[in-house]
Amino acid sequence: MKKLISHIPVSVSYFFVLLFCYAAISKMLDFENFQVQIGQSPLLSAYAGFISYAVIILEIVIVILLIFPRSNLFGLYASTALMSAFTIYIFLILNYSEFVPCSCGGILEKMGWTEHFIFNILCVIMGGLSVFITERAGHMTNLKTSLILGMSNILSCILVIVLFFKSEHVIKQENNFTRRFLMHPILKIKSMDLDSHSFYFAGAKNEELYLANRNLPQNILAVDSLLNKVKNTKIDLELSKYPFKKIEIKVKNNDYYIYDGNVPIILKGKLGDAQNKIISLNDAFFSQLEIIDSTQIAIRTLSSETKNLTLGTIFINNSGKNQVKLHSDLLEKQLDGIFDSDGYLSSDPKTQTVSYIYSYRNQFLVMNHSMQISHRLRTIDTTKTAQIKVSPMSNGKFKMSQPALKVNGHAIVYRGLLFNPAQLRGKHESSNRWKESKVIDIYNTASQEYIGSMYIDNIKNNSMSDFRVTDEYLYAIVGNQLVQYRITQPLKKHFKNGEAENRVSE
């Protein structure tokens, strides 16, 4: 029996050598994928670069220690401590993580997280037992062995716990451009063919979608939530009466709005009624528009005083005497006040908030319905200053003299979440996956946190051109396809109730 027990440390050493050799080699052979896996870990995302190298080096060092008789004992201590660290990591994944990622590949590819957890506990027990047997052979007391073994294992576990809390803070509050992809936040349900690639979302109401066509601005296409019932409504539009250049349509509640910022005019009509009327004429030129409510319209315009891009509000008065108020303190000039402030307006139909995201820097604004600033938040990209180059023209205007580094896309806000189609690939992300899909980063505007990201896959080499979020679904236009995705609980749980809903609940 004693002879059999004496062989346990040798057998366990061989086992750890094989385990760590295989693990280190498999990670090195597919290092990019290993970094991506660490980058998507819900616990260690912020330190994926350091940890991906450290784990491989540590496994190789432990193998070397185990091979040589003089250092074998240190190798057993280190093996046990490392397996303890892996065990506490899985425990945190299963009990404290916001989501449980896919299990790792390699030798444990077929195991789930619970099986991993049990396997690691057995490894810790085998390693600890081998240490006790070896130390007893060297006349070390069990108490001293227990203290050393316990201290090394506890320290390794504490290190993982500290990394977990620090990583959570970095990812959500001080992100260093590491994306965390949510686990199945949306599930593809179905799709339908559109006649052309020129459709965009005009709005949504009670899970009914409204699409407009840039080539046929007189039409509004209504699609039900099952993507079955399609109704095409024509609207009266005198294209020859005004010098329209780029007509757009927005739907809000039971109304549709027609506008073209090049012409200072806004028309309004009831859904289903082709007739419409002018509600704003010569009040202001604008380059973007968002409907806050029936009496307030947010615009982006060029200030005649500062010559900078400025956000403003048109107050609609039934008497015909509208008012325009500019909010010159909202957009912050960095270089020229025009290109550097370029971005996208969006309004949240549920919370009555307005957002503006800059195209060329990592910042977006959140405002209340009165266009008063609530938050200035940063996206996870690290571009704080717009990387653009402008040259003055002889007429006093400026022109972009070289392509700018675009950071953010046409983001939208819904139920307190900002959905941003990102333009730049983050750290530890698969280049192939990036080429095959569009990435949407999601932020909680109330808690001022980055929640995570998700992919919208390309279809026939076409990437997503527009999208819309409702209570139950995310809809995307990809090429000439309208694609419906069901929003799952990992994303839906972050939705914020609207003001009206909050008042009812109170």
Image (tube, rainbow, N blue to C red):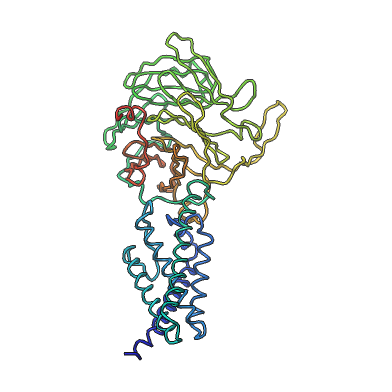
Residue sitting at the far right = 394
| 89 left or right, relative to 175 | left
Provide residue 333's location: percent of width, then percent of height.
63, 32
Of residues 106 and 465, which is closer to you in this image? 106
Specify the quadrant of the image occupied by residue 206: top left
In this image, 372 relative to 94: left or right?
Answer: right
In front here: 480 or 20? Answer: 20
- The answer to whether residue 359 of the structure is visible from this angle is yes
Q: Which residue is drawn at 46% across and 63% down?
A: 34
Q: Where is residue 283 in the image (x, y as percent from the top left)?
A: 52, 15
Closer to us: 3 or 417: 3
Q: Is the residue 289 above or below the residue 335 in the image? A: above
- Residue at 39% x, 16% y is 276
The quadrant of the image that shows the C terminus is top left
Work out whether 254 lies above or below 389.
above
Name the residue nearer the viewer: 169 or 261.
169
Q: How many marks?
A: 0
> Residue at position x 43%, y 24% from top?
292
Q: Position of residue 92 (x, y in %)?
A: 38, 58
Expressed as whole percent of the image width and height from the top left, the position of residue 133 reads 40, 83
The answer to whether residue 418 shows anywhere in this view is no
The quarter of the rendered structure image containing the N terminus is bottom left
